[in-house]
Image: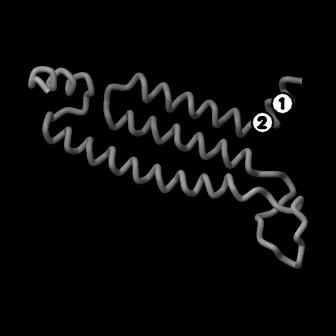
C-alpha cells in the first residue's frame, strides 16, 4: 500500500525532498551565495509541487479547440499561472539579494555571515 502511494505521488515526494535540501542549506550555510542558492532550491521545489498538483492525466491545456467546452476535458490553469508569477518574483528577489551581497562583499571583503555580523558589532551598528 505504501509503495503504490509513493509511486503515485513521486513528484510531490521529490518536491518535498528538494524543499528540505534547500531549507537545510539556507539554515546551515554561512556563505551568503550558498544561502541564496538554498532559497532558489526551495522556490523550485514549490513550483514543482504546484505543477504536480495542477496536472491531471488525460486532460489538456484550457484552450477551447473544436468546440469542446466540457470542464472535465481541461486542467486547472491557476497552478500554472501561480508558477509563472512565482518565477518572475523569484528572479527579482534573487537579483536584489545578489546585489546586496555584492555591496556587503565590497564593504567587508567576505561573504561569511558570521564574520559580517562580528564586524557590524565592532562598528557599533
* Residue 81 placement (x, y as % from top left): 63, 58
Q: Mark 2 points at which residue?
A: 9
Spatial CA span between label 2 and label 1:
6 Å
* Residue 52 placement (x, y as % from top left): 72, 45
Horizontally, is 71 left or right of 37 in the view? right
Quadrant, the N terminus: top right
Q: Mark 1 points at which residue?
A: 5
Q: Is mark 2 on a helix, strand or loop?
A: loop
Quadrant, the C terminus: top left
Horizontally, is 53 left or right of 36 in the view? right
Quadrant of residue 18 within the rendered picture: top right
Q: Which residue is drawn at 47% across and 52% down?
A: 89
* Residue 105 placement (x, y as % from top left): 19, 39
Q: Nearer the viewer, residue 105 or 93?
A: 93
Quadrant of residue 78 within the rendered picture: bottom right
Q: Residue at x 42, y 24 (%)?
A: 27
Asked if the residues shown at circle 2 and circle 1 are in contact, with their CB atoms under 8 angstroms apart, the answer is yes
Amino acid at each position: 500500500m505504501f509503495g503504490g502511494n509513493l509511486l503515485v505521488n513521486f513528484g510531490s515526494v521529490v518536491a518535498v525532498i528538494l524543499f528540505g535540501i534547500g531549507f537545510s542549506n539556507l539554515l546551515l550555510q554561512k556563505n551568503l551565495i550558498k544561502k541564496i542558492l538554498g532559497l532558489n532550491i526551495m522556490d523550485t521545489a514549490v513550483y514543482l509541487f504546484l505543477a504536480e498538483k495542477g496536472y491531471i492525466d488525460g486532460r489538456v491545456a484550457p484552450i477551447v479547440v473544436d468546440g469542446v467546452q466540457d470542464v472535465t476535458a481541461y486542467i486547472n490553469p491557476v497552478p500554472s499561472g501561480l508558477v509563472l508569477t512565482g518565477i518572475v518574483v523569484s528572479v527579482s528577489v534573487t537579483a536584489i539579494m545578489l546585489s546586496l551581497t555584492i555591496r556587503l562583499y565590497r564593504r567587508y571583503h567576505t561573504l561569511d555571515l558570521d564574520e559580517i555580523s562580528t564586524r557590524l558589532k565592532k562598528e557599533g551598528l
